[in-house]
Image (tube, coloured by chain):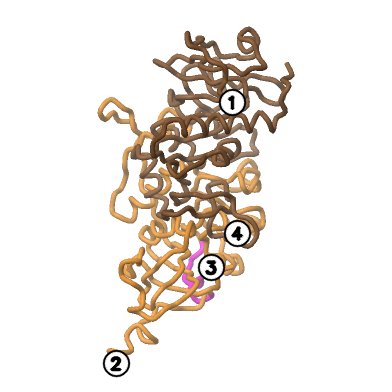
Chain colours: A brown, B orange
Amino acid sequence: MTLPISEEQAKERIARRIARHFLEQGRKLVINLGVGIPTMVANYIRGGNIFIQAENGILGVGPLAEGDKIDRQLINAGRQPVTETPGCSYFDSATSFGMIRGGHVDATVIGAFEVDEEGNIANWIIPNGKQLGVGGAMDLVSGAKQVIVGMQHTTKDGTSKLVKGCRLPVTGFGEVDLVVTELGVFAFEARRLVLKEIAPEISLEAITAITAARFQVSPGLQPMALS
Amino acid sequence: MGSERGMSEGTKLKSIEEAVSRIQPGSRIMVGGFGLAGYPEGLVEALVASGIRDLTIISNDLGSPGIGLGKLLTNGQIRGLIGNYYNWNPEVAKAYSDGKIQVTLVPQGTFAEAIRAAGVGIPAFYTATGVGTELAQGKELKEFNGRTYVLERAIHADVALIKAHKADHLGNLTYYKTGRNFNPLMAMAATLTIAEVDEIVPTGSLDPEVIVTPHMFVHIITRRERG
């Protein structure tokens, strides 16, 4: 199935929708953003209420650094040069993961290869002999108060990334709270996957057909909040 | 003589070559840094030049192919790696697949805490990170307050090569932005700690409130300009 939106538009939509999730809470939040789509969430966060923590030891990550603002000693966890926000602080890696493991980080936004019906997430390795790394993914999904997955609905060949059961090595079991794709917003409620919002380009029948995981439809199903 | 203290007499300042000459083949060596932020570039270059082999390198990552710590692998000096993220350097997965090196992957927060634990006399600790995953296989599990935790052991080293911003002659250290990362933890977790710094200042000139690593953890200081 081909959607009338491009891959770039899909990624932007996912990032905007997650940013909105934070902004509409209207309170101070500390969040951690993974690489890829999750990093784009920062582009849509306004005001001074949302503080971005990066696990390499900074609270108060600002926009990406450009030109003479680039300092190779000031990077985010994706190794991108970033800037400081007012009130920014630095700390060592044990303190950083103490914030995460200790339940002091309100949410982690993270990408995934697969999320399954049980809220299990696989996002650390595709065992093809070309990757060898786990990073902070396991710490983040088990430690953050809320785990929000921002990912495209399908792989490039159209395979659903919402699956019945993860086949790839799992990062964390039953840890996912919210999944935002370009086609909809899904929440785990009482450990069941529930469709809460649906994108304007797709029908309920079509999203059901394209999604391998079984899900319930929220009685209060809304059009996906795009703004 | 008292007024000379901290100057020529009693200084821990040595040349990078002299510092690296203290490292034996087969050593377990911790190296600070996250990507290229806060890694001791001069010490790593000297280690590469020394040709010392059979090293176990304990670090967050291994730089990129032929860059930073990656040079040690290209140069055939590495026997084993303990760390968490090698996807920035595909040569690691290849060397591992070819059976040339051993690799122990540890989730990043567990890695940081295991190093911290080694430095503060805690032999092992329980964490929820990784429970049920491949990285917790074969490790002891225990339930506390209804949640399952995995026992992780402290990580010690023979030598820590760390990067700091300023040092006085006693070896008190300050850090610079996200260059701090694992460095203060590694300083405490090795038998011999060698710190490479941007600037040496007179003893007594650092505000005691900004010293992150007290001098007792630092055995040798070396100097190299920040790039």
Reading the image, the residue beneath label 2 is: B1
The residue tagged 4 is A70
Q: Position of residue B26 (x, y in %)?
A: 50, 59
Residue B66 tag number = none
Amino acid identity at mark 2:
Met
Chain hosting mark 2: B
- Number of the front mark, 3 or 4: 4
Asked if labels 2 and 3 touch by Cβ distance under 8 angstroms, the answer is no
**Which residue sits at x=65%, y=10%?**
A206
Question: Does the stretch in magenta take in B37?
Answer: no
Q: Position of B100 compared to B148: left or right?
A: right
Q: Is residue B149 above or below residue B168?
A: above
> Which quadrant of the figure contains the C terminus of chain B?
bottom right
Q: CA distance from mark 3 to mark 4?
A: 24 Å
Residue that mark 3 sits on: B43
Q: Residues within 10 Å of mark 2 (few under 14, many from 20)?
A: few
**Dot 1: within a 10 Å radius of its alpha carbon, few (fewer than 14), some, or many (20 or more) residues?**
few
Horizontal and vertical percent position of residue B68: 60, 59
**B125 to the left or right of B45:** left
Mark-to-mark CA distance, 3 and 2: 32 Å
The reply to whether the magenta stretch includes residue B22 is yes
The image quadrant that residue A27 belongs to is top left
Marks 4 and 2 on same chain: no
